[in-house]
Image: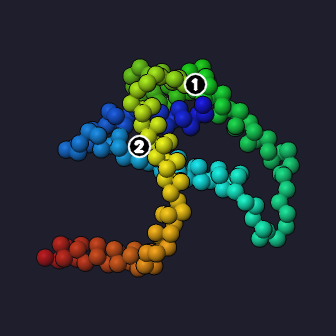
Amino acid sequence: PLNGFLSKEILLEESLHVHVGGLPGWLVPAMVTLAALLSVTYSVRLIRDTFFGPRPESYPRTPHEPPRGMRMPVEILVVLCVLIGLVPAALAEPLVASAATAVAGEELPEFHLALWHGLNMPLLMSMIALAGGALLYGARARLFAFHAALPRVVAKRIYDGSLQGLYNVASAITFR
């Protein structure tokens, strides 16, 4: 129940209503769910490696806790994230409405921020992202081994080749 879940739920919900040209209606929600799945994967890796992984032994000095003055801003943000996640209608809805109205320049469609909207498609998409992200994180050792076995790719060569190819195409079109 953090405010990040609230924004992810809004993104998942709105992706169900986006229609792009002749693309199938399921494509945007599938892409957003995949992005959420990858977000879960890197978040799990970051949290696990940072807080539960082995202590690095290559530090030149022993790490220590920061002073209270450096921790306090982070602690305030954590409390706000939890409060907004638990009671979004009271704390965030007026701010979201005000900002969105200012950007849209017109009255907004009805919306309601809540921790629970029942069993719905965005919740299913979240569950797919959570389960898929956990599975992908669990497969990381095999994925890293597969990546290590691939031939070495030099990104600069790919980038330079792409630019040269675009230049060649543009030159052929421009000078005909």
Query: Is residue 64 or residue 165 the one in the foreground?
Result: 64
Circle number at residue 100: none
In the displayed structure, 21 sits above or below 63; it is above
From the top left corner, tell me how far across and down residue 5 is, in percent.
54, 35
> Which residue matches tag 2?
33
> Which residue matches tag 1?
88
* Element carrying mark 1: helix
Q: Is residue 45 left or right of residue 51?
A: left
Q: What residue type is labelled 1?
A: Pro
Task: Residue 159: name its quadrant.
Answer: bottom left
Query: Is residue 92 or residue 129 the one in the foreground?
Result: 129
Query: Is residue 19 or residue 95 the one in the foreground?
Result: 19
Residue 30 seen anywhere in this rendered image of the structure: yes
Q: For the C terminus, which image quadrant? A: bottom left
Residue 154 seen anywhere in this rendered image of the structure: no
Query: Is residue 104 or residue 119 the one in the foreground?
Result: 119
Residue sitting at x 49%, y 50%: 135
Q: Residues within 10 Å of mark 1 (few under 14, many from 20)?
A: many
| Residues at marks 1 and 2, CA–CA distance in whole angstroms | 23 Å
Q: What residue type is labelled 2?
A: Thr
